[in-house]
């Protein structure tokens, strides 16, 4: 009897490990596809967020369309994918870890066991599980997010015109000049940003699946599910965009001789005082267009999960 229980326990543990690995692979694949599709919008967004601190930009961009036009003219079309490899290296494990930890936190908060999957408490648990998973995953890969940002705003067509040669060169130079703290500048606003974003991103999408009218609409086809995911992604991004701007600007202080901001709140205060409140939303339109990657990732992962569930039945 004891041996049978041990076998059952071993099989259960093996299933959990297998399930976690499948979640990581499916989450990573979904993230890679979505991020590559939206790379041009993401680069434009980051450039516009940080242009006031970028000495390589002599004339400010009038709009995202002006930014698209000038970059394509000055650096070529392929330059829109500059830093995309760093972004994928960062984003794929972040999403994979995030989706995996979301399942673990969902179990921790009892979301898988509750029969009544409605109400404010249930929505709060979805928010917390998504937020905790996202914050933990992003903190692990934060140096790659830093590298992606610095490569994206490193203007110039040739390597001689640019500050960094690649991902690891960027990290190496930053650590040499500023120490480990240099590649973690902006980590505090980032944690707040990611916790809220992922909480809304994962939580709202999962919660809407329990609302009958939305669930019926999502089940029609892949594109209906994608539309709901896109609305969820834009909603989540709108909540946290100012924090993201603060994070990017603080990242720009690394490898700089002068420290302009003493912290996240000082950075936010200076941006509003010197550039106006609208400055914290600079590049927001490009971010909305970019957010399709998040919607694609969310929809692909959910579709893969549904396929696996049907196959196991």
Image (spheres, rainbow, N blue to C red):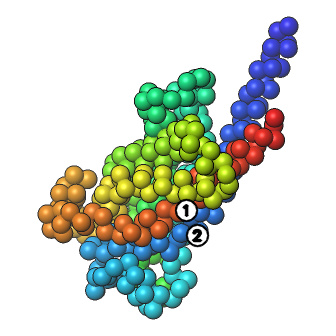
Q: Residue at x 76, y 32 (%)?
A: 15
Is 109 situated above or below 163?
above
Query: Could you tell me how far apart the alpha carbons at marks 2 and 1 are, in whole angstroms?
Result: 7 Å
Question: Which residue is the extreme one toward the bottom?
Answer: 73
* Residue at screen point 30% across, 82% down: 62
Q: Nearer the viewer, residue 258 or 64?
A: 64
**In this image, 197 relative to 225: left or right?**
left
* Vertical arrangement, residue 7 with respect to residue 289, above or below: above
Image side of residue 239 versus residue 13, left or right: left
246 to the left or right of 311: left
For residue 121, which quarter of the picture?
A: top left
The answer, for residue 105, to whether it is visible in the render is yes
Query: Badge 2: few (under 14), some or many (20 or more) residues near its Cα, within 10 Å?
Result: some
Q: Residue furthest top?
A: 1
Tell me the residue that label 2 is attached to. Answer: 37
Q: Secondary structure at mark 2?
A: helix
**Residue displayed at 39% across by 69% down:** 285
- Quadrant in the picture for the N terminus: top right
Question: What residue did someone put label 1 on?
Answer: 293
Where residue 102 appears, as percent x and y from the top left, is 56, 39
Pointers 2 and 1 in contact (C-beta within 8 Å): yes
């Amino acid at each position: 009897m004891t041996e049978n229980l041990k076998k059952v326990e071993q099989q259960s543990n093996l299933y959990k490990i297998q399930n976690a690995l499948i979640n990581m692979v499916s989450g990573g694949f979904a993230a890679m596809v979505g991020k590559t599709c939206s790379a041009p919008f993401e680069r434009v967004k980051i450039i516009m967020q940080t242009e006031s601190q970028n000495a390589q930009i002599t004339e400010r961009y009038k709009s995202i369309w002006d930014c698209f036009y000038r970059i394509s003219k000055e650096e070529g079309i392929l330059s829109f994918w500059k830093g995309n490899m760093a972004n994928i290296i960062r984003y794929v494990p972040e999403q994979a870890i995030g989706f995996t930890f979301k399942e673990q936190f969902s179990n921790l908060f009892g979301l898988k066991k509750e029969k009544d999957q409605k109400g404010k408490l249930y929505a709060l648990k979805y928010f917390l599980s998504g937020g905790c998973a996202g914050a933990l995953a992003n903190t692990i890969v934060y140096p790659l997010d830093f590298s992606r940002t610095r490569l994206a705003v490193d203007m110039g067509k040739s390597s001689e015109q640019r500050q960094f040669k690649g991902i690891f060169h960027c990290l190496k130079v930053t650590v040499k000049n500023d120490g480990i703290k240099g590649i973690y500048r902006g980590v505090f606003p980032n944690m707040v940003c990611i916790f809220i974003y992922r909480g809304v991103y994962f939580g709202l999408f999962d919660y809407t699946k329990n609302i009958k009218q939305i669930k019926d609409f999502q089940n029609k086809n892949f594109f209906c599910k994608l539309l709901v995911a896109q609305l969820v992604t834009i909603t989540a991004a709108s909540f946290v965009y100012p924090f993201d701007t603060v994070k990017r600007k603080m990242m720009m202080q690394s490898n700089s001789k002068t420290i302009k901001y003493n912290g996240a709140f000082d950075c936010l205060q200076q941006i509003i005082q010197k550039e106006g409140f609208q400055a914290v939303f600079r590049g927001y339109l490009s971010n909305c267009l970019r957010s399709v990657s998040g919607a694609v990732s969310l929809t692909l992962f959910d579709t893969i999960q549904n396929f696996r569930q049907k196959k196991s039945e």
